[in-house]
C-alpha cells in the first residue's frame, strides 16, 4: 500500500478525496488541511499528525494506536471501526472558533487520554473506552450509547447535561465531578453510588 505522505504529495489542502495510505511508526504528516475526505483501511500507529486539520472527514478502519496529534484539529469528523489504543487525544488544539463535535462508532479506544479536552456534544456509539482517562475533560452534553467505560477516570470532569444511559461498567464520584443534569439509567446510578458504599438491593 502506498504511503499517505505520497498521496498527500506536499499539498496543504485536500478536499473530498479518498485516501488509503499508511503512516509508519515515527512518520510525520504536518501542515495539511483535509476537508470532506474519507480516510480508510490504513495503519497510522505510532505516527504523528502535527498541525493537521480534519474537517467533516470520515475515518474508517484506521489504526490510530499511539498516534500523536500536536496542534491538530478535529472538526465534525466521524470515526468508524477504528482502533486507537493508548492514544493521547489530549494534545489536540483548541481553535479560536470552537469546532463541531465529532462522533466515534464501533471504535476501540481503550487506554486513551482525553485529559483536559473539550468534547462538548461528542457522541460515542458501541465503543470500548476501558481505562480511558477523562481527567479534567469537558464532557457537556456528550452521548455515550452501548459503550464500556470500565476503569475510566472522570476526576474533575464536567459531565453537565451528558447522557450516559447507554454506558456501563463505570464509577463516577459526584464529589469530584460536575454532574448537574447528567442522565443515567439504573445501571449507571449504581456507578454513581459506588463511591459512597451504598448497596442497592
Image: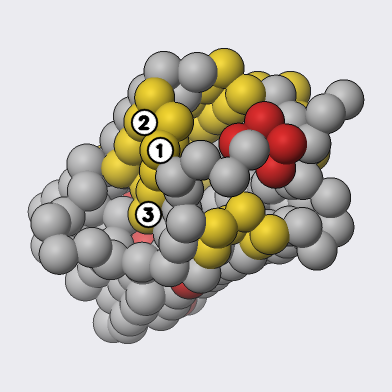
Query: Left or right: 182 with respect to 154?
Result: left
In the displayed structure, 40 sits above or below 178; it is above
- CA gap between label 2 and label 1 equals 8 Å
Query: Left or right: 33 with respect to 7?
Result: left
Please give the name of the residue rendered at 44% of the width and 45% of the height, measured from the top-left corner: 12
Which residue is at the far front?
A: 10
**Residue 179 percent coordinates (x, y):** 21, 64
Looking at the image, which is closer to me, 170 or 152? 152
Task: Answer yes or no: is residue 48 visible.
Answer: yes
In the displayed structure, 54 sits above or below 190; it is above
Classify residue 86 by image quadrant.
Answer: bottom right
Mark closer to the observer (2, 1): 1
Q: Which residue is mark 3?
A: 73
Q: Which residue is mark 2?
A: 35
**Residue 201 percent coordinates (x, y):** 46, 50
- CA gap between label 3 and label 1 equals 14 Å
Whether label 2 touches label 1, CB < 8 Å: yes
Amino acid at each position: 500500500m502506498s504511503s499517505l505522505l505520497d498521496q498527500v504529495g506536499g499539498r496543504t489542502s485536500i478536499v473530498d478525496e479518498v485516501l488509503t495510505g499508511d503512516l509508519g511508526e515515527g512518520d510525520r504528516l504536518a501542515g495539511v488541511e483535509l476537508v470532506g475526505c474519507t480516510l480508510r483501511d490504513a495503519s497510522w500507529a505510532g505516527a504523528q499528525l502535527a498541525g493537521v486539520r480534519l474537517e467533516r472527514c470520515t475515518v474508517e478502519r484506521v489504526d490510530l494506536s499511539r498516534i500523536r496529534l500536536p496542534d491538530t484539529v478535529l472538526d465534525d469528523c466521524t470515526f468508524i471501526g477504528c482502533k486507537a489504543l493508548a492514544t493521547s487525544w489530549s494534545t489536540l488544539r483548541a481553535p479560536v472558533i470552537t469546532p463541531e463535535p465529532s462522533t466515534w462508532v464501533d471504535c476501540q479506544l481503550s487506554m486513551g487520554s482525553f485529559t483536559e479536552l473539550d468534547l462538548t456534544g461528542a457522541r460515542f456509539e458501541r465503543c470500548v473506552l476501558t481505562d480511558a482517562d477523562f481527567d479534567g475533560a469537558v464532557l457537556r452534553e456528550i452521548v455515550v450509547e452501548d459503550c464500556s467505560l470500565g476503569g475510566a477516570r472522570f476526576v474533575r470532569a464536567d459531565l453537565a447535561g451528558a447522557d450516559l444511559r447507554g454506558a456501563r461498567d463505570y464509577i463516577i464520584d459526584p464529589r469530584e465531578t460536575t454532574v448537574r443534569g447528567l442522565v443515567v439509567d439504573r445501571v449507571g446510578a449504581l456507578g454513581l453510588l459506588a463511591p459512597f458504599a451504598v448497596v442497592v438491593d
